[in-house]
Image (tube, grey):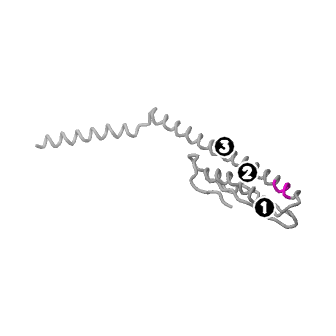
Amino acid sequence: MMKKVLSMLLAVCLLLSVFSASALAEGKGTKKAQKIEQKIEKAAEKQDKNQLKTLSRMVDKANRQIEKLVRTAQKTPYDDIDWLQAMVASVTAPVFAYAESIGATVECTYTTYYIDGQYVDVDPLRVINVIPSGNGGGNGGGGGK
């Protein structure tokens, strides 16, 4: 009986020593996995940078469109403030939607213009916060007026 217990104990110790050594070993598979992980991280960072560039271009384009709309409203002799505000909302809506999808925040900073005999606040955009997502998706932030 004692021989059986001793041989089983010896077998368990032998198995543990074999498996623990292979589990702690750092081989080609581990280095390869680390390289793949680094490539994934770099790709995610590049995607985040590209998304931020796209958002910045969208904000710049929207601001140029808003400036043109304001100049048009200032030149016309009739009351077109409601039209201007509706057009500004239609220009800014896609920018807010994209910003929210990538986890960034876009803010309206009101500027006062003199249009049709009265002062009107119009809201050019600016990017105020970009939250790194790590996977390229939107995981926070959000756009809003």
Tell me which secondary structure the magenta stretch mostly adopts.
helix
- Residue 50 marker: 3
Mark whose residue sits in front, 2 or 3: 2
- Rendered view: 36 above or below 49: above
Residue, x 37% and y 37% (percent of image)? 22
Q: Residue farthest to the left?
A: 1
Callout 2: SS:
helix
x, y (%) of residue 112? Answer: 82, 64
Residue 79 found in image quarter: bottom right
Question: Do callouts 1 and 2 mark residues in contact (Cβ within 8 Å)?
Answer: no
Query: Could you tell me the amino acid type at mark 2?
Result: Val
| Viewport quadrant of the N terminus | top left
Q: Which residues are magenta?
A: 69-73
Please report whichever mark, 1 or 2, sits nearer to the chain's N-terminal start: 2
Q: Tell me the element at label 3.
A: helix
In the depicted view, which residue is nearer to us: 55 or 37?
Answer: 55
Amino acid type of disc 1? Val
Q: Position of residue 82 (x, y in %)?
A: 77, 62
- Residue 26 vs residue 53, the one in the foreground: 53
Question: Disc 1 vs disc 2: which is toward the camera?
Answer: 1
Indicate the position of residue 5 as horizontal and vertical percent values.
16, 43
- Snapshot quadrant of residue 119: bottom right
**What residue is rendered at 76% in x and 60% in y?**
85
| In this rendering, the label closer to the viewer, 1 or 3 | 1
